[in-house]
Image (cartoon, helix red, strand yellow):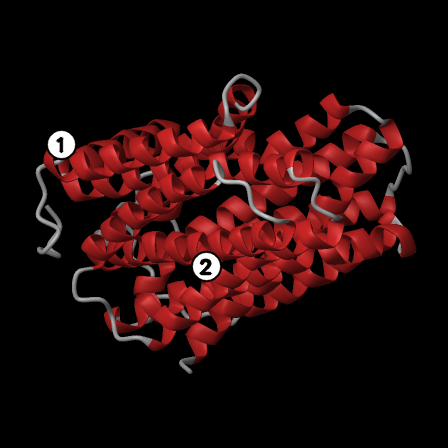
Amino acid sequence: MNKNIFKILSITFWGNFFSSTLIFIIGLYILKEFENIILFGWSQAIGPIVTLALMPFLGPIIDKLSKKKILIIGQFISITALSLYFFTFSHHNLYLLLMIIVFLKITDNIVTTTISSTIILITEEDEVQRIKSLQQVLLALINIMAPLLGAIFFTVISLKSLVFIELICEMICLLFITNLHIKNRRITDNTGDERILSMFLDGLKYSFKHKKIMFSLFFAGIVNFILCSYLIGLPYIQVNVLDFKNIEFGLTESIFSLGLIASGIFLSISKSLKYPLKFSYLSVIGMSFLTILLGSLLMIEFNRFIYVLLFCGFNFIIGIFISFASIPVTSWLTINIESAYQGRIFNLLNVLSQVLLPLGILFYSQIFNYFSYTTIFIISGIVLFLFSSLSTKIFAIDLNDNELS
C-alpha cells in the first residue's frame, strides 16, 4: 500500500475514532446529569450548526492555502481546546462540555474536507475509488464502535480521563499529518476577507456552471434527506410498534454498518467503475424500490422471527446501496474537479450532508406522528424514484460520459 494512502487512512481513523466516542459520551452525560432533553438536542445540533457557519470560509481557505498547514491548524484547535478543558476541568460545567463539542466539530470539518480535496494530490486516479472505499469501511467501523465503547467507558472511566485519551488520539493524528507529503497548488497569493468571500462565490459559480457537479450535489442531498425516513422510522417501528427486545434491535441496527463495510470492501478491491455516476444513479433507483418494498411488506403481519430477518435484510441491503450511491460519486468528483476548486466543492457536499440530515430528521419525526409508517415508506420510495428518474433530464446530462460538463 502507498505510504501516503496509509497515512490518509490513519488520519481518518485517529481523527474520528475517539472524537466520535467522546461526543457520544458527552451527549449521554448531558442527558443523564442535567436531565434536559433540550440541552441534549443542542449537543446533537452543534455539528450541523458548525458546518453551516464554516461554509463561506472553509472551502476557499482550503483551496487558497497549504493543505498540510490547514490540517495542522485544525489539529492544534482541538488539541488546544482539549488541553484547556483537561487543566480547567469542572465536573458540572455545561458550557465547557458544549465548547468541547464545538471545537471537535470544527476540527472534524477542517480535516474531513481538507483530506477529501487532498487525495487527488497524493495518489493516482485509479486509486481514488479504493481510498474512498477504505475510508467508508473505517468510518462504518467507527460508527459501530463509538456507541459501544461510549456506553462502556461512561460507567468506568471519568470524563477527565476520556478527554485525556482523546487528546492523545489527536496528537497521534497530528503525527501522521506532519509526515504526509502533499503537492500544494496555490491559486493566488491574495489575502483578505473580501478575497475569501469572493472565492466562495466563485466556487458556487463553478458548481452551477457544471451540470454534473449540481447533479452530484442534488443526489447527495436527496439521499441524505430520504435516509432520515430510515433513521426515524425503523427504530420507531421496531421499538414502539413491534416491541423488539434490546438485543434484537441492536442486531438489526448493527447490520446496517455491516452493509456499509461489505460494500466498501467490495469497491476497494474492484477495478475503478467505468461509469461511476451511472452506477450511483442505479443504486439510488434500487434504494427507492427497496423502500417501497419495505412499506408494502410492513402491511403484512409476520411472526417475530420473520420481522427480525426482514429488518436485518433491509438494513444490510440499504447499507450496500448507500455505499454504492456515495463512493462512486465522490470518487468521480475527486478525479474530475479542478484541484483549485476541490476544497469548496467538498465543503458544499459536507454542508448538504450535515444540514439536510437534521432537517430530514425533524421532518420525519413530525410526519410519523400523523401518518401510517407503511404509507410514509411507500411515498418516500416513490418520491426518491421520481426525483432520481427526472434528475438526468432536469440537469440534461449523459451518465455514460465521464467528462465534467
Residue at image coords 39%, 68%: 131
Q: Quarter of the image for the C terminus: give it.
A: top left
User: Which residue is more in the foreground, 369 or 92?
Assistant: 369
Q: Mark 2 points at which residue?
A: 68
User: Which residue is more in the foreground, 38 or 107?
Assistant: 38
Q: Quarter of the image for the N terminus: give it.
A: bottom left
Residue at image coords 31%, 75%: 270
Q: Name the residue under label 1.
A: 394
Can see residue 250? yes
User: Which residue is more in the foreground, 188 or 361?
Assistant: 361
Amino acid at the residue labelled 1: Ile
User: Which residue is more in the foreground, 6 or 180?
Assistant: 6
Q: Give the Cα separation between the discs numbered 1 and 2.
A: 39 Å
Can see residue 202? no
Mark 1 vs mark 2: in front: 1
Q: Which element carries disc 2, helix, strand or loop?
A: helix
Quarter occupied by residue 34: top right
In x, y percent, where is residue 121? 31, 65
